[in-house]
Image (cartoon, rainbow, N blue to C red):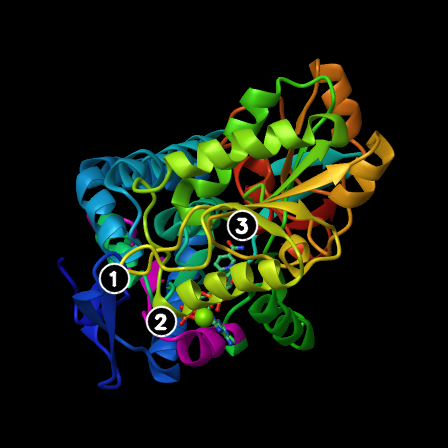
Amino acid sequence: MKAHDGMYIGGAWRPAAGTDTITVLNPADEQPVGEVPAGTAEDVDTAVRAAREAFPAWAATPPAERGALIGALRDQLVARKDEIAETVTAELGSPLQFSQMVHAGVPILVAGSYAELAATYAFEEKIGNSTVYMEPVGVVGAITPWNYPLHQIVNKVAPALAAGCTVVLKPAEDTPLTAQLFAEAAHEAGIPAGVFNLVTGLGAVAGQALAEHEGVDLVSFTGSTAVGKQIGAIAGAAVKRVALELGGKSANVILPGADLTKAVKAGVANVMSNSGQTCSAWTRMLVDSARYDEAVELAAEAAAKYGSRIGPVVNAKQQARVRGYIDKGIEEGARVVAGGSEAPREQGYYVQPTVFADVTPDMTIAREEIFGPVVSIIRYEDEDEALRIANGTVYGLAGAVWAADDAEAIAFARRMETGQVDINGGSFNPLAPFGGYKQSGVGRELGPHGLTEYLQTKSLQF
Ligand code: NAP
Ligand code: MG
């Protein structure tokens, strides 16, 4: 893998202020694949200054021109599609085909959507005797996780640039090589110097310095709820805007009239893809008691099929964490019907695709985000109980409802406390707002709603 030994700041790769480095490991074989500099507060400060300096000219660039440059960035991502997929596979461990289709493919769609939105969005509106201008918020500090390394970056950088904001990105320490590839693409696309800047480094050092920096107007964070709470507190104290995309514990609600086989298979596939490392994964499967045993059998079969096709989880710590949750589930009385906590291979951070039956809503595995290939099947007696269980966690990011027809599923989904629900297998829409109710977050990403996060209004009366 190609790795830069500097930071991308002000349109060029520059040496880091310090000498510390981060070694990137391939989670499939635990071997090093590259090394990047570990940024310090000094690097963050240099990058924020570059972003500040570039802000006035970028904000004044006509939106259609910004859109054209985001379009060029999209084309650069297309040109690097294979390299992106190979890099994500090397540092995250996901199977190459999934990296190609999802990790490389989806960001291309999202970047394309913001190229178009920049050019077509109404940045000006008339309300009575006022003209309301939508102006960029300023300098954005973006902090991203490793689970969808490029998607999480593009979800923030593309709308920020479309809005006229400039950006400093601190990507996850586990997946910095994908972030460096993105910086190369931005450079080749002709995004002006200082509009996009990259500082690789550790969360507690570079991430924290970025969140705390006075020159940052908006912190956009995706990751764990624990760190999200800290970032929210820092932003609140400084009266800075903040967007938080946090964890989830989404429910896959299978109502009595639904096609059970289809719903169970889709539910298991949803969790197993990306080795369960998806914040919106439907990790709780809710089934009525009449069909419970049948659903458990179908789910166990479906999970067993993933045996050798599933990738590892991202690192040793996550592997230990996920295995710990599986042990906890057994300890609290849930029944393993596929997989288990034993590591399936000698080498690599693999976890067995695991299905639990007899899970009750109060169990740890039903309440906490596991972030691994683990599905919990929970029994309900009637629709009201299903709703209570579905809404019974602190999270509310996503979910699914399956029923005999769409109308019935929609009626149930409208009562769910969650930001996105797929109805009878409805497909991913890169323009639909994505984000959490309750502790799953603050703010929305994707499409026009994602764009407004980076805008503030100015009203002129005349
Ligand atoms: P995390 O620590 O929240 O990481 C997310 C990002 O925040 C990374 O870039 C991280 O840097 C950075 N960060 C960490 N501490 C920070 C701080 N004090 N100030 C500013 N930035 C900071 O998540 P994780 O440790 O990688 O994963 C732990 C758990 O979080 C997972 O098991 C999962 O439950 C959840 N998670 C959720 C999502 C999601 O999409 N909702 C994504 C990833 C993880 P480093 O890379 O250096 O830590
Ligand atoms: Mg961390």
Q: Is residue 208 magenta?
A: yes
- On the image, the x and y values in percent for residue 178 come to 27, 54
Which stretch did the figure color magenta? 187-211
Packing grade of label 1 (10 A; few <14, some 14-19, many >=20) is few
Distance from mark 2 CB to nearest ligand 1 atom below 8 Å: no
Q: CA distance from mark 2 to mark 3?
A: 29 Å
Packing grade of label 3 (10 A; few <14, some 14-19, many >=20) is many
Q: Residue 439, located in which quarter of the rendered image?
A: bottom right
Say which residue appears at 24% left-offset and 62% top-offset: 347
**Label disc, if present, on residue 346 of the rendered structure:** 1
Name the residue beneath numbered marker 2. Answer: 47
- On the image, the x and y values in percent for residue 297 come to 55, 31
Say which residue appears at 43% left-offset and 30% top-offset: 116
Say which residue appears at 37% left-offset and 56% top-offset: 313
Label 1 is placed on what type of residue? Glu
Q: Earlier in the sequence, mark 1 or mark 2?
A: 2
Name the residue beneath numbered marker 3. Answer: 279
Tell me whether circle 2 and circle 3 mark residues in contact (CB < 8 Å): no
Q: Residue 452, located in which quarter of the rendered image?
A: top right
Q: CA distance from mark 1 to mark 3?
A: 28 Å
Distance from mark 3 CB to nearest ligand 1 atom below 8 Å: yes
Tell which tag, 1 or 2, sits nearer the viewer: 1
- On the image, the x and y values in percent for residue 423 come to 64, 24
Q: CA distance from mark 1 to mark 2?
A: 42 Å
Q: Is residue 455 above or below residue 30?
A: above
Q: Is residue 237 above or below residue 273?
A: below
